[in-house]
Each structure stands twice: as structure tokens, then as C-alpha cells.
Amino acid sequence: MTLFHQGGVRRLSAVIAAGAMAVSAALVAPGPAAADTPWLDVSDDGYLSISVPAAYIEASMGQVSQLAVEGNFGPSFAWAEYGLTRRGDLWWGALGPLKPGLYHYQITGDDTKSLKDPTNDTGVASKPLWSTFFVAGDSARLLADVPQGQGGEVETLTYRVKDKERSALVWTPPGYRAKAPRAPEAPKGPRAHEDPRAPKAPKGYPVLFLQSGDDGAATDWLDLGRARQILDNLSAQNAMEPMVVVISDGLDDDRALKDLRKAVADNYHVLRDPKHQAVAGVSEGGTRALRAALTTPGRFAYAGSFSGLLEDGVGRANAKAINKNVELVRLYTGNVTDPAYNATDRLTKALDDAGIDYEFDGVNPDAGANWNAWQENLIDFVPRLFRTVPDHGPSAGHGPLKGEFDPPAAGTTPTPFLTEDGFVTFETTTDFKDARHVTLWANVAPGGSWLRIPMTRQGDRWRVTMGPLDPWFYYYQPIVDGVAVKDTSNPTKVTSEPNWSSFFIPGERSRLLSDVADGQGGKVESLTYRSDVANEDRTALVWTPPGYDPGRAEPYPVLYLQHGSGQSYTDWVEMGRAKQILDHQFLDGKLVPMVVVMGNGNVFDFNRELLENIVPAARARYNISSDPSRQALAGLSMGGVQTLGVLKAHPGEFAYIAAFSSWFGSGDGVDAAAINNGTTMLRLYVGDQTDFVQPFFMASLPTLDSLGIRYEFDGVTPGPHGWDVWQKNLIDLAPRLFKR
């Protein structure tokens, strides 16, 4: 089986880059009793830690070669697959930091066998395999439970229509007063038992009819939409009018909505006049809500469309009646990944042409057509109902529509296609027209971790648009029916990973990773040398600064920069963006002019390879110093371990030492005094909780402390055991060299 590797660890391709889950995952028969320990744990700062017992998976699914957690972890909260790594008797993974909000997920093995997490009591009625977890935070405070006893009530309304039983969910506000039964007429005058100071019972409550989409259920508004928590919190803050909210499945015709309205009026203390009636829905439910309000003005005074798909059908003849009878029409859409984006663009033009008044909440830049967006829509919509509000503009941070989103035609190359605001469209060739399922594996999770995003078939190709992605350097590969392939329409390459391609999103955040103007940067050359250790000719890449002078009287200081396991001398240039980083920092005046040598560290005796082969070859070719105070050695993962090994065995040979995502190891036989005397700077780096090396790294710091070795710890670098972290490490390290 092909192995993938990232830094110092090799992972089975089936785990970190395997294909997508089957469209309809097979339900797994109940397995043995689950362990008490939760499989998923969320830290206070939003990191998700996953530990799934391999024995339980084997008992439930049989032997599996890969296991993934599928959930709304992708960009814009899109559905994505996160591959777990087998570690002894556990399948393990870590992801984050996740944005505050509600997440849903399931466990899937070998792409086709899915099960519910038996250690999580939460559930989604319409999706039996799903569980949920909540990441707390200020931006999600309205999604949190209110203290017990302070919220409204949710009950099921069951009613019959033509001998068919139907049901809906009904939220009533705190302090709701039910409709009083009709009583005999009382004598006129004050009643002896009445307290004149008691608040008068309302004549009735306004009502909001809230619909799901065609693929959903009424219960989704509670299980996924957090409607109860939203309404409870808004009510507790006096941010909404007391109202009754009726939640239903998608009502497929006007008659069904009429029947529901009658059942609600018969059973709840609600006002029946149109000025106290509102309707809203998600997706197709939003389409129906708009039609109900616009085609027969006078039935509903308020209408909200959350990712609705209505595009036209609003004739000019209705404009006067609509504007007179409908108090509010408010439209909501996610970003360009939302199918409603283009529909909303067309609808706003149609409404403008027809002279119909409406409000547009603006484009939500951070979510598509999913519950994370619709939660925000409900939070914005409900406080506008049955009251006068001063603000009629878009929500904070939402932007205007920019015309229809129209990616290039099929077959346009090179791929992927990038927009200015960070949305990326990937497309396969026609070679996979008969594939069953295709995903796109990329470093698009928080911090640069890796997710697989499902692609959809379009004709004889597969496509997906994702984003918005922050400005940075990205790499990816399509996974076709479980097999990684190269995007042959993308000319970029990664020598050590032939199936990987890359792309770059420009911006201030990624400026140091961008190419400098032609002719302004340094040069990267190949250096061929003989390796007595490997018994072969080998190659290193060497960066020389702009204006490099081979005849300069003072030799240049030199940094020897090493790669990780499964990588080679090309990776720091092709993946680490070392040339771009060094070019920018030199031009910014932050870098001491130096030469950087990136050798091949794939040998059993790195100390000999470095000191007897790489260093002599570099000195013979370039005007570089042999003075230890002008020499630096750094490496990532395996290369970091090698770097620290040189420090232990040859203290004082390199005055500047740095290790990225590695650990010191044993202190046996270490000459701490020689290290301190011969080392100007020992600087250490590691990723966050998603970097599997972090526990080993942290455990090694007491060893350094007990030995009395002086070192600097940069603190945790956000991100996993991958290039997003190591690029940041080099950005921090290079300007510190040769300045003490």
C-alpha cells in the first residue's frame, strides 16, 4: 500500500488521503457496549481531540483500514472528512481550533461503514447516525442553553387533515398564557377575586411559521438549528416580541400551510390577523415562505427567506398590494458556496424591477447553505418581527452581492480557479467520469490540518467550490474511489509527493510566501556532492542572497536547513517556500546576508553526512564561513531530531541551533557545559495540540531544564505537524540568525 508522509511521520494513504465516503453509508449493526470514556473531547479553546477504541470499531464494522470522522468541519462549515491515525489500540486525531458553534458528525470506516458515536448522548432525529457537540464562545452565546426554568416550552402539536395525522413543533415563550376555555358570561362590574395590579392577559400572541427544507425535518430546527436556544436567549434579553413559533416540515402546498394555521389557531392563544403572522424557512422552505407572502398579499405581514431558491415570479402587478400589506420581506444568503447565492442575485433584481420593497441581510462571508448560516438568519430575523426596529441594513460583516458566481467552463485549465476573495473551484479531468465518489484532500482545516471535501459530479467531470480560504500557500490532491491522483491540469509539482499540487492565495497574511518581483530575489542553485555515507552522488539546493559576491573578503554566514522524514532536499523550496521567505526578509532589511544550504538528510548517519559531505561540498562551492559563530543548523521533525543529535555529539560546531516539531530525547552523556559555551542560540518550536509531536516535545523540556541547558521556546505555533507551521517557524528564525 502506498504510504504518505508529512514531516517525520508516515501515514497510510488510506488514513490521511483516502477517498470519500459512499453517498449512502451502510448502517452498522449495534456493536458491543461502548467504553465510558467519550470518544470526542472539546477543550475550552476549541480543540477537538478524538480517540476511538479500535476494538469497538472492529467488533462493530469488522477490520477496517481507515477510519474518519465526517462532519461540518470544512470551510464555511461544509461537510468534510477528517482521517484518523491508528495508534496502538486507538484511532486518534486532533482538529482545531474550531469556531464557536454547533457541530454534527458521524464515524465512518473504509468509506462505506458508518456508525453513531455511542459515547455521545446527543442525536439528530432525521439523521440517526449523527451526534452533535457545542463549542462555546461569545459569537455563539445565543446558541447556548439558558438556565433551567428560564426558557420557553416546546411541545408537539398533532392535528388531522382529511383523516391524515400531521404534526408540528410549537415553541411558546416564557410565561405563555394559554387560550382560556370559553366560560359563561360573568356579571358586569369588578370581580371580587381579581387583583387590579396583576398584568392583563394578552389578547393573543403573534405567530411565526418556520419551515424546514425538502431534505430536512421539523426536528432539524431543534437538533441542528438550535431554534429553542436562540428563542430562549432572545426572549431572556427582551430582544424579541413574545410570540408563538410553529416549526414544521416543508409544507408542499398552500393548502397544507392553511391547515396548519387553522390547527394552531384552534389550539394556541394566537392572533389570527395577517399583521400578527410571519412565515420563514430554509432552502425550499424559504422559497415557499416568499411565495406565500408575495403571491397572496395580506396573509402574512412578515416573510423571511433563508437560502431560499426563488428567482422570479414577482410580477409588477402585485407590487402595490405587497408593499401595502407586507411589512417585511427579508432575504438571506450564504457565500458563493450556497446554491441560493445566484438565485438571490436574480431575485433582488426581479424585486427591484417590480418595485417591491424588501431588505437584504447581505452575503454571509463565512457560511454556505447550512445550519450555521441559518442559525444566524433566525437570530437576525426574529427580533424584527411585530415591532418597529431602527436598523434595516445587512448584518455586521455581511457584504453586497457581486453578480452571479460563474466559474470557468468545464475543461478550462490550469486549475484550480481562484476568486479575489478566496474561493477556490477544483475540477477533475474526464478520466474519472465513471468514479463513484471523489474528494479533494487539502490543508484547509484550521491551522493547516488536512480535510477531504466531497466533490460533486458535473457532466463527465467532478467539481467543488470551497472557501473562503485565508491568504496562504495550499496543497492538495484528488482522491478517486480511495486512490490518490494528480491534478494533471495544475502544472505545479512536489517532487517528494508526486500526486500533490499547490496553489497560492495572495494577501497581507501570505505576503512573505509570495514571489518577489522578477530580478529582485536571491538565486536557488543545485549543488551536487558525493555522499560516502549513502555511496552515491547527491544534490542539495542552495539559496544565495541578492548581490551575492563569491569574492567578498568576509565569507557569508551559512544556515544548513534540513527536511523531515519522507521528504528530501527539494521540499523546503517546493513546500516550505524558503526562497520566497528569504527573499522578502532580505528585501525588508530583516535578514543578515547569508547562504542557505538545503541538503538531503535521508541517511542512517546524519552526523557524518553533514560534517563530512554536505558542509565540505558547500564550502568548496560557495564563499561561506567555517567559523562556528557564523554557522547555523536547523531542521523540521526528523531533521530537527538530527539537528539536536549534532548538537549533542558536536557541541560548539554550530553556534545557532533550531528545531521545528521535534524533541531533545535522552540527556544521557550530554555535555551541557559544552553546549552552553558553544551555542549562541538554541531555539525550539512546536505546533499546537494537532501536532502529534507536541507531547514528546513538552516532555523533553524538563530534560533540558534539569541539565541546565539554555534554550528559547517560541511558544506553540498554531497548526499541525505540517508546512503551515514550519513556514512560520522559518519566518521567525531567519531574522534572528547571526545578530548576537
Image (tube, rainbow, N blue to C red):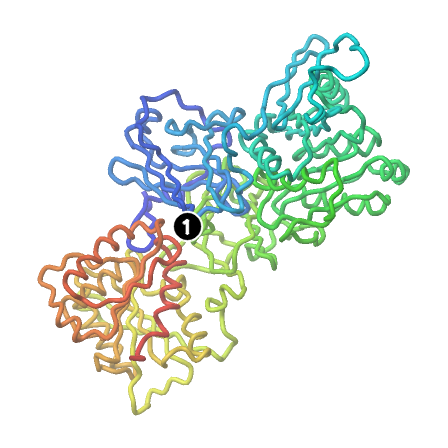
Q: Nearer the viewer, residue 576 or 713?
A: 713
Image height of 612 relative to 685, above or below: below
Percent position of residue 507, x then y: 54, 64
Q: Nearer the viewer, residue 469 or 384?
A: 384
Image quarter for residue 89?
Answer: top left
The structure residue drawn at horizontal position 58% and vertical position 53%, both measured from the top left corner, is: 423
Q: Secondary structure at mark 1?
A: loop
Q: Type of residue at label 1? A: Ser
- One can see residue 534 in this view: no
The structure residue drawn at horizontal position 67% and vertical position 11%, both measured from the top left corner, is: 164
In the rendered image, the quadrant that contains the C terminus is bottom left
Q: Residues within 10 Å of mark 1 (few under 14, many from 20)?
A: many
Percent position of residue 169, x then y: 62, 22
Image height of 323 relative to 164, above or below: below
Q: Nearer the viewer, residue 559 or 286?
A: 286
On the image, numbered disc 1 is attached to which residue?
449
Image height of 351 relative to 294, above or below: below
